[in-house]
Amino acid sequence: MTDLLLVAMASALAGFIDAIVGGGGLVLTPSLFAVYPQAVPATLLGTNKSASVWGTAWACSQYARRVQLNWRALWPAVVAALVAAFAGAWAVTQVDPAGLKRALPLVLVAVFAYTLARKDLGRAHRPRFVGRHEALAAAVVGTVVGFYDGFFGPGTGSFFVFLFVRVLGYDFLHASASAKLLNLATNVAALALFVPKGHVWWHIAPVLAVANVAGSLIGTRLALRHGAGFVRAVFILVVGTLIVKTGLDALRL
């Protein structure tokens, strides 16, 4: 019971972080591995996805009600992210991702430095594209990050947010709302692989899902109340933490 309480609390915190800017996997995944060290890694990853998909879906529904999204541009991106996540999951069975693990901290440092240097980045919502051009740009983002999520995964939500801000010109609030929709697609893609292979612990997944939704509820309300500036601040904090985490992981290779 103590173990379940610990991972449920971690799931709630993960849902809170995910709802604002992504990166909840920084909390729940290591917690599952720490509490259940003898478990098969794929099962822990599948159980993580089975919880986070509900928190992401809840956050997505709440953002959709309060933030005006360009659905015509986002639906092609959702399809692209879904297909690319499948492709990435297949690719990881063929190629060792060790090189990407070593390079990831450097990529995150670049994202972190660029965001800090551009004080106005993501504070105003000024889409750079319209019509088909916006849909194409969003689909490219969905393809690139979706493949990354299937192939490796850490920081997927944050990469979605950053690219929507940098490439499409969204503010951080609109970028986070859009990222939830695409992240939901990649989570569903992952579960489509994990569930048939039995890599979900159904005896704890519902508890983690409820906790994740509860955390997502709080995170979404804070993001909607405080706007793009708040989301930007959390984004910088999460990316900074990701740099430390992935840097330590790379040194252990």
Image: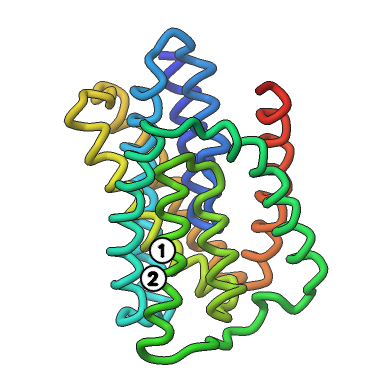
Q: Residues within 10 Å of mark 1 (few under 14, many from 20)?
A: many
Q: Which mark is residue 139?
A: 2
Q: Name which residue lies at 52% across and 43% down.
A: 24
Q: Residues within 10 Å of mark 2 (few under 14, many from 20)?
A: many
Q: Is residue 170 visible?
A: yes
Instruction: Tell me the quarter of the picture where residue 235 sits.
Output: bottom right
Q: Nearer the viewer, residue 133 or 32?
A: 133
Name the residue type under label 1.
Gly
Q: Which mark is residue 88?
A: none
Q: Position of residue 164 (x, y in %)?
A: 53, 71
Give the residue furthest to the left. 196
The answer to whether residue 221 is left or right of residue 184 is: right
Residue at disc 2, secondary structure: helix
Instruction: Tell me the quarter of the picture where residue 5 sits.
Output: top left
Q: Position of residue 185 (x, y in %)?
A: 31, 55
Q: Nearer the viewer, residue 38 or 202?
A: 38
The reply to whether the C-beta atoms of the residues labelled 2 and 1 are less than 8 Å apart is yes
Give the residue furthest to the front. 94
**Distance of label 2 from label 1 (alpha carbons):** 5 Å
Name the residue type under label 2.
Ala
Give the residue furthest to the bottom. 130
Please, is residue 212 above or below residue 1 in the view?
below
Please, is residue 125 above or below residue 253 in the view?
below
Q: Name which residue lies at 28% across and 23% down.
A: 201
Q: Position of residue 7 (x, y in %)?
A: 46, 26
Q: Position of residue 146 (x, y in %)?
A: 41, 54
Q: Quadrant of the N terminus?
A: top left
Q: Is residue 54 visible?
A: no
Q: Which mark is residue 142?
A: 1
Q: Quadrant of the C terminus?
A: top right
